[in-house]
Amino acid sequence: MELNKYIIPVLGPKGDDLDISNIADSIKSGWWINGPKVKEFEERFAKMIGTKYAIAVTSNTHGLDLILKAYDISNCDVLSPTMSFATTAAVPLWNNCTNILCDIDEINMNICPKDVKTKITENTRAIICVNLAGILAPINEIRKYYNGLIIEDCAHACHTPGAGLNGDIAVWSFQAVKTMPTGDGGMITTNDINIYNKIKKLYWFGIESTYDRINNTPGSNSVYRWQYDIDILGYKYYMIDLTAALGLSQMAKLDENIKRRQYIQEKYNAAFKDIEHIVLPPFSYTVQHYVIKVDPEKRNKLIDYLKEKNIHTSVHYRPLHLFTYYKSTSSFPVADKEWVKMITLPVHLNMSDHDIDYIIYWVKQFFNSVNI
């Protein structure tokens, strides 16, 4: 097959005229900050997930920070998986917590309930469970021996059926390469009215939003109510309408976009199922990442080989306990054994059928080579 003249990235967002139109409408409206589009986005998102409340924020990371603050999680232990992005390890440290990393299961690569059980102490006040690659974490298993706060990180799971409904509260991501991207941004979903109200105060310095002070003033006929009180230390984590406008247009296309991602997954699975050197990933509804496993001595060779063919790949993720800042004295036998086999192949909406076939062709060529 002739080499591509362009590079196929491993991940990437796709926008269209609907996205441009939605953002343009917000720009023309004169309301750019936290206003009507954010409210609409929150209401539609909560309905889609099946929760009572949703709170739109600047990122998944800030959402997790707000959750810990709303539940007064500080000066304690927080457990999270070593196979994750830095967010889940860093945010507990922001709140003066000790982050305890846990090993993963061999198949789904999610947090391992057995390892969690060994690391729970009387000082454990929260567990962060990540739905890695859109596959639901084993929260119900952990519930059998832990009745404290479980935060469900759904950054990869928008919208895997059932995601966001298993933990006590959930946090989502709309970062640029996620299934419903807005450039950056996040959402918190909950059924707890008290936590909802507290986070709403925390996410803008303890101040009621300007939009609410215009529209919720009794008998005001939408007259701006300038006076407000501050009775809590707050932060600046609210989403703005320009971001929410993009979120609404991306939400309108979510089902269609996920079907395309699943189509790519199906094509890969059919092409690679008979290659003895490849272990296929478990089914992912969102296909946030498509991660095959190959023998460790072949993994980096395959990455380099595909790069020469203008195909970019990645590894999701290098375990957090291997990073200098998050080094741990604990043992992570499964993560250490599995991560060196992992390679993430491209899955995104900008890929043509030719791109999919091109990637399949060169992966097969690599494994047909006498040099492996």
Image: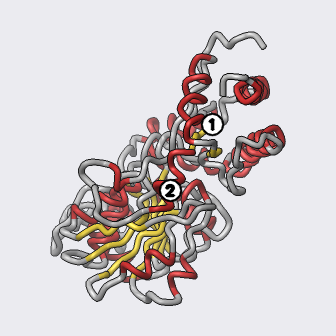
Image position, residue 41 (x, y; %): 52, 57
Q: Which residue is mark 2?
A: 155
The residue lying toward the viewer, choosing from 87 and 104, is: 104
Q: Is residue 91 left or right of residue 176?
A: left
Mark 2 vs 1, N-terminal side: 2
Q: Is residue 36 visible?
A: no
Q: Give coordinates of residue 39: x percent, y percent.
A: 47, 60
319 versus 168 height, above or below: above
Give the crowd class for mark 2: few <14, some 14-19, many >=20 residues within 10 Å.
Answer: many
Viewer can see residue 137 = yes
* Residues packed near mark 1 inside 10 Å, few (<14), some (14 to 19) or many (20 plus): many
Q: Is residue 90 left or right of residue 255?
A: left
Q: Tag on residue 180? A: none
**Residue 268: percent from left, percent from top:** 76, 40
Q: On screen, 160 above or below 264?
A: below
Q: Amino acid at mark 2?
A: Ala
The residue positioned 48% from the left and 49% from the top of the image is: 244
Circle 2 or circle 1, nearest the eye: 1
Q: Amino acid at mark 1?
A: Leu
Is 18 situated above or below 334? above
> Which quadrant of the figure has residue 50?
bottom right
What SS does tag 2 mark? loop
Q: Position of residue 162 (x, y in %)?
A: 64, 71
Q: Which residue appears at 72% of the width and 56% of the height?
A: 283
Its colouring scheme is: secondary structure
Quarter of the image with the N terminus is top right
Q: Secondary structure at mark 1?
A: strand
Residue drawn at x 66%, y 49% is 287
Q: Which residue is mark 1?
A: 345
Residue 268 located left or right of residue 149: right
User: Which residue does the image show at 69% across and 29% down from the upper left?
Assistant: 351
